[in-house]
Structures are given as C-alpha cells and as structure tokens.
Image: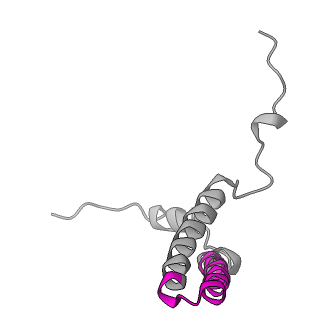
Amino acid sequence: MSAAKKPGAASRSTASRTSPTRKDKTRPVELIGLSAVFGVFTGLIVGLATREWVLAAIFFGVVFIVSLVSLAMIMLGQTPDADLPSVDDETPSTH
C-alpha cells in the first residue's frame, strides 16, 4: 500500500532549501590549502635549520593537522549570515 502524497508537498520542501554558493563549496579547500601552506612553511624552516628531513616531515604533519583543526573550529564559531541578530544586538531586558 502506498501513501498518498499531497501535490504541493514536494515543491515546498525543495523550494525552502537553498543551494550552497560557490564560496561555501570551496571553503573546505581554502582551509586545507591554508593549513598545507602553514605545514610546508614550518617543514621547510625545520628542514633547512636542522637538515633532518624526517624531523621536518614530522613537523609538517603536526602543524598541518593542528592548523586544520584550529581553522575548522574558528570557522564553526562564525555566524553564517551577517543579517542575523546576535546577542549584542538584542535590546536589554528590564527585569
């Protein structure tokens, strides 16, 4: 037995969803790229200073992972839309 669907139900659910913008789609690539730049910079500094390339690879990996997690946590803290009111924008309560 199949349940009867309302004719407008499918169109309302798809119309209320918005597709992500190009900026939203490329944000993970930006985070990975920036973390890779931090890691390569640190790896090169350690490698050129110590001439221990295994140690430089370890530092690259550690800095890459730490910066990736840190940047991701910072991005989670941002509000997705600047038009949304924040706690500071609300009027103070009188009670």
Q: Which residue is drawn at 44% across and 65% down?
A: 7
Q: In which quarter of the image is the N terminus?
A: bottom left
- Asked if the stretch drawn in magenta spans residue 36, the answer is yes
Furthest residue in direction top, as rendered: 95
- Name the foreground residue: 55 vs 73: 55
Q: What stretch is highlighted in magenta?
A: 30-55
Location of residue 80 in the rendering, given as x and y in whole percent from the top left corner = 69, 58
Q: Is the image coloured rainbow, by chain, by secondary structure, or in one colour?
A: one colour
- Name the foreground residue: 44 vs 79: 44
Location of residue 14 in the rendering, given as x and y in whole percent from the top left corner = 52, 68
Location of residue 92 in the rendering, given as x and y in whole percent from the top left corner = 83, 22
Give the number of callouts.
0
Q: Quadrant of the C terminus?
A: top right
For the stretch drawn in magenta, the main secondary structure is helix
Q: Which residue is drawn at 75% across and 35% down?
A: 87
Q: In which quarter of the image is residue 31?
A: bottom right
Location of residue 4 in the rendering, given as x and y in whole percent from the top left corner = 30, 61
Q: Does residue 43 lie above or below 19 as drawn? A: below
Furthest residue in direction front, as rendered: 50
Q: Quadrant of residue 34?
A: bottom right
- Name the foreground residue: 34 vs 40: 40
Quick check: 55 left or right of 48? left
- Name the foreground residue: 2 vs 64: 64
Q: Does residue 22 lie above or below 76 as drawn? A: below
Furthest residue in direction left, as rendered: 1
Q: Residue at x 80, y 52 (%)?
A: 83
Q: Residue at x 60, y 87 (%)?
A: 47
